[in-house]
Image (cartoon, helix red, strand yellow):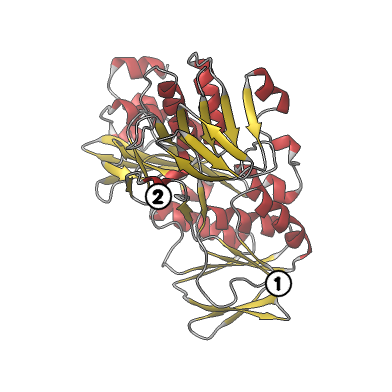
Amino acid sequence: MSAGAVIVGASHAGVQAAVSMRQAGWQEPIQLVSAEDELPYHRPPLSKAFLLGEKSADQIQLRAESFYAAQGIELHLGTRALGVDAAERKVLTTRGELAFDKLILATGARARRLPLPGADLDGVFTLRDMADARRLKPALDSALSVTVIGGGFIGLEVAATAAKNGKAVTVIEMLPRLLTRSVPETVAKHLAGYHAAKGATILFGKQIEAIEGEAGRVRAVRLGDGARIEADLVLVGIGGVADLSLAEPLGLATAAGGILVDEHGMTSIPGIYAVGDCAAFDNPYAGGVLRLESVQNAVDQAKAAGTHAAGMAAPLSAVPWFWTDQYDLKVQMAGIAPADGEQVLRGDPESHAYSVFHLRDRRLVAAFSVNRAADHMAARRLIATGAPLDLALAADPAVPLLRAAPEPQLRSAAQ
């Protein structure tokens, strides 16, 4: 009898990999290993609806517990994978060994730590998983002043949640603007202005010297210029680091900070796959190898890997896309923005509904849409097809975006 498949990590990527294996006809056992005690859950609500108390842990589960039993997926909750023996095809866990024919690593990423004095004080938090969110929520409810270190997506989402919860919020960003590597300047300026209008203070170009405390609890953040920002809660949101704790001892090839995989999610060892935040791959939309931290990339990679592990081929080809919700702004991103090329603004940022397009040779390569979901959906299709655009039509928010492409099939799709 086959040893079946072992999947290490039970968030979006791990669960989707299991589901995709079953959908592709895999009949052998599937064992899904999670260090968390929680049933697998949606992560985006952790920084928003869960912290605000709008959704409970049960309401953000990916699947009901009965689903896993019905699909023949054996859950190993509260079980940490300690190592992998590739020759013997076994995973060593805190609850014994699990044999495998196919292994999928969906180990994700861990929060990057702040290497400064005071980073371990009570009241200093990171947010990557449910355990983090459970600790953060009561502290946020009782806090008066909240300081967020890092103007990335997690930091800004928590800042918006804290402001909506009536807290005094300060965001400290070491660079001259928000989201330098993620969004164009137009969107960054709009988000900064929106946060300020909601009462948040954003400090740019600031270095942090230390986090100060009293009796073991955080009291302030001290900046390099000597300024002192009082805070009774600090959220550190300075990015994530891929969890390579199982990959490195195996000698798996790595690149761009992640486990290097092909278009099927296969690592440098046959039969072992990696998906989601821990994996790096040669993305045709980026023109090189990169590691993407996003739910949709995790799901798309898991579909490709699960299908291939089950004996079928469905290589990853989806356009990368992302989103963030801050206050009543939904920011949706598609493609990977190049360092050069032309930008087209569609609509007025003052209306809080607009898009910014990045083009190369009149072809759309990346799109950033704020409260314009139709633009986002059309942009994903246009990026995938590589259709040249009529720039005047693309810039007109009154014209459906697909009509900016001259191809008859795209014009008819916009009718």
Disc 1 residue type (three-letter): Asp
Left or right of 367 in this view: 17: right
Residue 57: quarter of image: top right
> Could you tell me the amino acid type at mark 2?
Glu
Q: Is residue 10 visible?
A: no
Residue 121 vs residue 393, the one in the foreground: 121
**Left or right for 105, reference 345:** right
Report whether residue 217 is seen.
yes
Mark 1 or 2, which is nearer the eye? 2
Q: Position of residue 190 (x, y in %)?
A: 49, 55
The structure residue drawn at horizontal position 36% and vertical position 19%, both measured from the top left corner, is: 313
Give neighbour class at mark 2: few <14, some 14-19, many 20+ (Cα, 10 Å): few
252 versus 227 height, above or below:
above
Furthest toward the front, the residue is 88
In x, y percent, where is residue 238? 50, 61
Expressed as whole percent of the image width and height from the top left, the position of residue 259 reads 38, 44
Numbered label attached to residue 248: 2
Of labels 1 and 2, earlier in sequence is 1
* Residue closer to the observer: 44 or 23: 23
- 187 left or right of 117 in image: left
Which residue is the site of mark 1?
A: 232
User: How far across and down, in percent of the image, does residue 41 sit?
Assistant: 65, 37
The local secondary structure at tag 1 comes to loop
Left or right of residue 280: residue 207: right
Is the residue 70 above or below the residue 11 in the image? above
Q: Secondary structure at mark 2?
A: helix
Residue drawn at x 52%, y 86% is 226
Residue drawn at (41%, 51%) of the image? 182
How many numbered marks, from 0 up?
2
* Vertical relation: 44 (above or below) 185: above
If the image is split into quadrants, where does the C terminus sit?
top left
